[in-house]
Image (cartoon, rainbow, N blue to C red):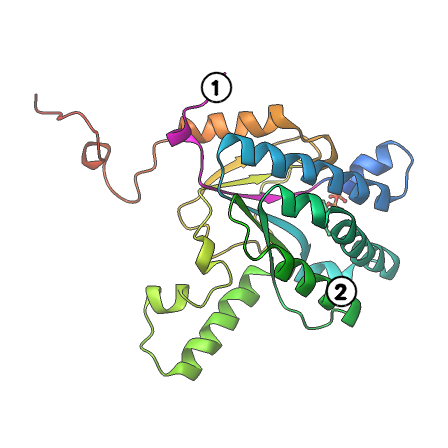
Amino acid sequence: MAIALESVPRHIAIVMDGNGRWASKRFLPRIAGHRQGVEVLKRVVRACGVRGVSVLTVFAFSSENWKRPVDEVSALMDILVVALSRELNQLKKEGVQLRFIGSREGLSERVKQSLKDAELATAENHSLTLNVCFNYGGRWDIVNAAQALSASGEAITEESLARRLSTFVTGDPDLIVRTGGEMRLSNFVLWQSAYSELFFSEVLWPDFDETTLDAAIQAYASRERRFGMTSAQLPGARNEAT
Ligand code: FPP
């Protein structure tokens, strides 16, 4: 069923969980799940563009993922570099702007260069912004913003702090999707999720497709976002007294 454009979330954020389990179920190494995860991500970027989503933010590597086995960490770094070099031209053609969010500390020169090149090459694109959270943590984001605010001497307000968060230019996610059956945020967009709608799916990320994306968008479209107000106060609400 087609969803009216005004009911489509402007900004979707996704915790792409379940790659390891998808691979284990097939007696494959975990990294095969991450590779399949990249293929799915490409498809989802395209599907979001078609549906009129403006911003997609994905959690690709968390500040805590350094605790994984060294081989898996280095494979994830390789996957990122290889995917960028392979997909950059297509992303440019599709008008996707890439932004990498997270600390560059601890990343190799090769990884840092490839992030920089991809951002530069797509900086003028405006069809869809893809925020890739890499070496990212929500707490890191808040601490980083607080340090910058404190150094500026500006008064501490919600607005002055929010302006220094890594996602400020693309705004807060309207909808956060987590695949893989877990129901937590795992240090993802902690500040920005204050009023996001949440959608949890049992589907493992490498099995995610347009059907699951549409189920999430449908669920979002059926929610009433009140931002602390009552239903009657919302724009377009029927006057209850009449
Ligand atoms: C969580 O699944 C997934 C990750 C830690 C990596 C997500 C990365 C991708 C989808 C590939 C795209 C990556 C880049 C670099 C663009 P998990 O490994 O925790 O799965 P499990 O819970 O089944 O073990």
Q: Residue at x 32, y 69 (%)?
A: 157
Q: Position of residue 64 (x, y in %)?
A: 69, 61
In this view, the residue in front, 61 or 241, is 61
Q: State the extent of the magenta-drawn residues as a range.
A: 1-17
How many numbered markers are drawn? 2
Residue closest to the eye, 140 or 2: 2
The amino acid sitting under disc 2 is Val
Magenta stretch: residue 26 in it? Answer: no
> Looking at numbered disc 1 in the image, what kind of residue is underneath it?
Ala
Q: Is residue 32 above or below residue 101?
A: above
Residue 136 seen anywhere in this rendered image of the structure: no
Q: Is mark 2 within 8 Å of ligand 1?
A: no
Mark 1 within 8 Å of ligand 1, using the beta carbon: no
Q: Where does label 2 land, which residue?
A: 111
Describe the element under mark 1 as helix, strand or loop: loop
Determine whether 161 is above or below 126 in the image.
Answer: below
Residue 152 appears in the figure: yes
Q: Residue at x 48, y 25 (%)?
A: 218
Residue under numbered circle 1: 2
In the rendered image, residue 11 lying in the magenta stretch gets the answer yes
Instruction: Estimate how packed mark 2 is, as few (under 14), some (14 to 19) or many (20 or more) residues with alpha carbons within 10 Å.
Output: some
Quadrant assignment, res 227: top left
Q: What is the x, y in percent for residue 5?
A: 41, 29
In the image, farthest residue toward the left: 242
Q: How busy is the neighbourhood of tag 1: few (under 14 within 10 Å), some, or many (20 plus)?
A: few
Horizontally, is 32 left or right of 107 in the view? right
Which residue occupies 85% across, 32% down? Answer: 25
Q: In terms of depth relative to the viewer, which is nearer, 117 or 14?
A: 117
